[in-house]
Amino acid sequence: MVYLTQRPHRKHGRAKQTAVSYYLYGTLFLYFMSITVVEFNMGDIFFYLGLGSVLVLYWYFRKSTLPFSLRCKKSGRFLDMKTFLYDDRNILPEYLEQIEREQDPER
């Protein structure tokens, strides 16, 4: 559901949408891994190996899989839910307006 709600926010939320798609791929892999383990009466260790490999890949590619931040880069306050999920800049909207005014003094 989060992935579908991120689609209208592509202008400033591409990295977070990509990260959520990686989470979906990892979850799908683990789902198929669990079905395979149960159907073929394999040991639980095979599922744990799959889980470990997914976690290692997430850690190795952490710049693209962990773009989320709980706090604003400018003020240090907690981000609201919309900014947390949809905006790659991780800056609260009131500080974004301030930055835009500084960059474009004619406004």
Image (cartoon, rainbow, N blue to C red):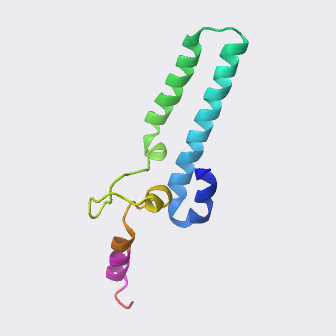
Nearer to the camera, 61 or 26: 26
- Please give left or right for residue 87 compared with residue 76 in the image: right
Whether the magenta-drawn stretch holds residue 87 is answered as no
Rendered residue at 57%/41% (across/down): 22
Whether the magenta-drawn stretch holds residue 99 is answered as yes
Q: Residue furthest right?
A: 39
Q: Number of marks in the image?
A: 0
- Please give left or right for residue 52 compared with residue 90 in the image: right
Quadrant position of the C terminus in the picture: bottom left
Looking at the image, residue 47 lies above or below residue 107: above
Rendered residue at 47%/61% (across/down): 82
Q: Position of residue 47 (x, y in %)?
A: 58, 18
- Please give left or right for residue 106 compared with residue 61 in the image: left
Q: Position of residue 65 (x, y in %)?
A: 48, 43
Rendered residue at 53%/18% (across/down): 48
Nearer to the camera, 98 or 35: 35
Rendered residue at 33%/72% (across/down): 95
Looking at the image, residue 95 lies above or below residue 103: above
Looking at the image, residue 67 lies above or below residue 31: below
Looking at the image, residue 99 lies above or below residue 43: below
Give the extent of the magenta segment: 97-104
Per the picture, the main secondary structure of the magenta-coloured stretch is helix
Q: Residue furthest left?
A: 75
Q: Position of residue 89 (x, y in %)?
A: 41, 62
